[in-house]
Amino acid sequence: MPVMKQEYSLWDILTSLLFPQKFILLSLTFLPRTILSQPSLLLPWNLPLLKSLWFTRFWSFVGPQVRENSSALVIPLLSGHISRGITHPSPIHPPLSGTVLEIGPGSGMWLPTLSQIPSITKIYGVEPNEGNAASLRQTVKTAGLEGRYNVIPVGIEDLEAVAHIEKGSVDSVMTVMCLCSIPEPQKNIKMLYEYLKPDGKWYVYEHVKTFDGELPGQGEPWEPKQPKWLGWYQSFMNIFWPHFVGGCEMCRDTSKYLLQDAGPWQEVDLAQPANSPWFQTMPHIIGVLTK
């Protein structure tokens, strides 16, 4: 399937460059109403809870729009129809199957999609945010996944001790727009790799640092390559971004953590989505990695 080159206007470029500021301002509008709902959140010892509730309230508003905007990529990814960033009419990879580890499901925006994949036998939804975990349990019922979907309200580092999930027992790992905010990403991504069985697959859709070099460990250039100044701009915006977007990091080198630090892969099928513009402040990677 050919990838069509697109031409972009100055307005397209400016809109992309201003996206972080607009998103931060939108998030900020949810802070006063969060405080008004529970004024005691302003007490110093309640600030972590304030940040959590603020982001939960904000994400409940923007999450459905994020899902709508990304469904055209995520749904084909989870069903095995994406390769080298291109959506194919026939599957290139197997769909999610067997025991699935979904990291950072939030309130469960992808559960309706997961409920339609018959090859999945069990799902562990790893969601340490208390507010999201409560909403996730309700979404499990709504999606008809009771008995198949287990909400795990702890971090990745506690999966074995608390949830009793054994290393090397998982068929599929699913990370969709979540690795940007996990703590200690190198350590935790390597830990997730260890939970995969040999031949297990990791389905990835994440925003990452700007692309100005080669695919880590592969010796192949990222396409499209992005200018150095865009990386500097992204780094500047990242000074503010995590404080307004639930600890999300714009400049996280997730590609390197997956491809060089996690462990060896039999097959790497990872790319930018087809027709990604060079001026994105939030570039993405998408694909399937086979252990």
Image: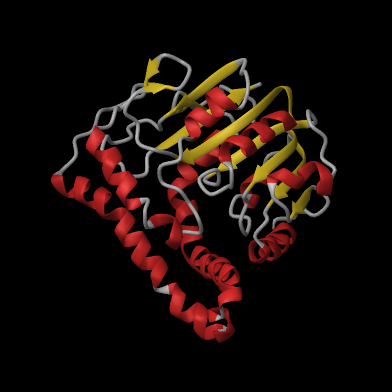
Q: Residue furthest front?
A: 44
- Residue 81 in view here: no
Residue 77 is situated, as x and y percent measured from the top left of the image, at 54, 34
Residue 13 is situated, as x and y percent measured from the top left of the image, at 21, 45
| Residue 168 position by quadrant | top right
Residue 18 is situated, as x and y percent measured from the top left of the image, at 26, 54
Q: Nearer the viewer, residue 228 or 8?
A: 228
Reply above or below: 241 against 170.
below
Which image quadrant: the C terminus?
Answer: top right
Which residue: 37% across, 30% down?
274
Which residue: 55% across, 46% down?
178
- Residue 162 in view here: yes
Q: Nearer the viewer, residue 204 or 166?
A: 166
The image's colour scheme reads: secondary structure
Which residue: 23% across, 38% down?
229
Which residue: 48% across, 30% down?
255
Residue 144 is situated, as x and y percent measured from the top left of the image, at 75, 55
